[in-house]
Amino acid sequence: MSDYSRREFVLFMGRTVGLAAAASMLDGCVSGSKLDPLPFVAIKPSTDDELKLAAGFSYDVLMRWDQVLNPAGDKFGFNNDYLAFIPLNPRIPNEGLLWVNHEYHDPYHNGGWRKGQPRTLKQVSLERKVVGGSIVHIRRTAGSPWEFVPNSEYNRRLDAFTLIPFAGGETIYGKKTAIGTFGNCAGGITPWGTVLTCEENYMNFVGEAEFDNQGRRTIKQVDGYLSWDKHIQLPPEHYGWVVEVELKTAKAKKLTALGRFAHECATCIVAADGRTVVYSGDDAMDEHLYKFISSKPGSLDQGELYVADTINGRWLSLSHKNVPILKKTFKTPQDCLVRTREAAKLVGATPLDRPEDIEIDPRTRAVIVSCTNNKKHDRPYGALMKIEEKNADPLSMEFTASTFIAGGPTSGFACPDNLAFDPRGNLWVCTDMSVSRLHEPPYENFGNNGLFYIPLSGDHAGRAFQVASAPVGAELTGPMFAPDGTLFLSVQHPGEWQHYKDYPASHWPNGGNSEPSPCVVQIRGPALERLTAKLDY
């Protein structure tokens, strides 16, 4: 990115943050309240097979699985998740590039597999083409929805065949380059306008490397419908990283300094000295919350990784050089980063309830973390956790941790996952109740997964109002606000359990007897415009 482009992107990001910081929140409740009303009536939990929105909101499908992107025949991938919008020119905000994660495949759709049949190498090869990420050129004209720009030079794919080098010329398990990226869940945007896409549950595809007390390596294989390891052998150490992507060129690299685990997201904030701080959660029960501090501004190639002790409010260094127990256990700094989970436990990190997405309150700089649930400890509903750095300084080594909003019958939502702050500083929360347990205890009263709006000040601060209900078996993911206030949203895995049946469990979005399709939608409408309207100042 040129110096001019970098300055322009910072200008764009500064406008967004400034609007949120200057905002006074819209508050209210449902119609009939004596309090200031919201511009919509919250919907009730639903089990209908549709993307159901509150009155005052409407949606259009922007992209769908298998849609052709370019003359080379590359197609939009499967199970879209995290979304990031980068303007082509920050001074012209109605045209840009949309990054879309494609988390995992479904063999039922992508290879023609049926339960009880053996998988084939051909089917696995088809599956490897639908994961990773898509770069999509979009634009809109006044009064019209956003539109995909077919055959644009920018429309590209990264998938499980794409060669991606390790940052800084690192050699990981004998190679300087990894083959592909997959398990891409959430992510982040750097201050210089690149996208961070996170490799989460890579072990479901290629197994995991395990090490004994002498450091001897074995591979734990996986036996599931996502697994490829019976057909291809890819070193697990090449996955579980944060991948940085420059959207205009599709140039990518794997950032080893941020550690290796089931990265859910990589949320950036700039410290007072210009360095970038990145927060990331490890999405598994009893895993941890991490913070990375870059060595210099404008790069994430080098820096120091920390893990949270939320009980004592301390960030614990994972520096191989400076922490004796890590130096004793791991031969090299690279070994420490490859085996980040082990390192975190050795220094005393606090086990958490599946820390997933992370967003930073633009008004207070509080770090909001989705802790989705923990079945091991009978905490099925999850909670939003708040991390308040000392003096609101992301470089601080001390913080206060607290429960911000607990999931459950009182709040009205369960299993918080993806988060977003809109231009006024309102919090939006997507839920992720497991498809295998939807509509069953303890989730029988929550309906399908949903999208919730939470005002953070005023009479109804901290109350959740349901805006959307997902189709049957689906999860709503990747909420992202465009500069014009449009909400981009992924509808992931509608009818997910269908590969265990002889018929689809969902027919969204086309209805009838059609096959379901993961899609990216754009949500607009007068209610959304009022909730997110920019202030005049």
Image (tube, grey):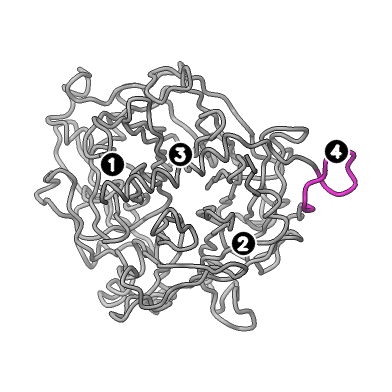
Dot 2: within a 10 Å radius of its alpha carbon, few (fewer than 14), some, or many (20 or more) residues? many
Sequence-first tag of 2 and 1: 1
Amino acid type at image mark 3: Met
Label 2–label 1 contact, CB within 8 A: no
Q: Which mark is residue 260?
A: 1
Q: Which mark is residue 523?
A: 2
Magenta residues, start to end: 29-41
Judged by depth in the image, the label closer to the viewer, 3 or 2, is: 2
Q: Distance between the Cα atoms at labels 3 and 2?
A: 33 Å
Residue 160 percent coordinates (x, y): 27, 64
Sequence-first tag of 3 and 4: 4
Q: Is residue 214 left or right of residue 503?
A: left
Q: Is residue 240 visible?
A: yes
Q: Distance between the Cα atoms at labels 3 and 4?
A: 40 Å
Sequence-first tag of 3 and 1: 1
**Residue identified by numbered label 3:** 285
Amino acid type at image mark 2: Ile
Judged by depth in the image, the label closer to the viewer, 2 or 1, is: 2
Q: Distance between the Cα atoms at labels 2 and 4?
A: 26 Å
The residue positioned 36% from the left and 32% from the top of the image is: 277
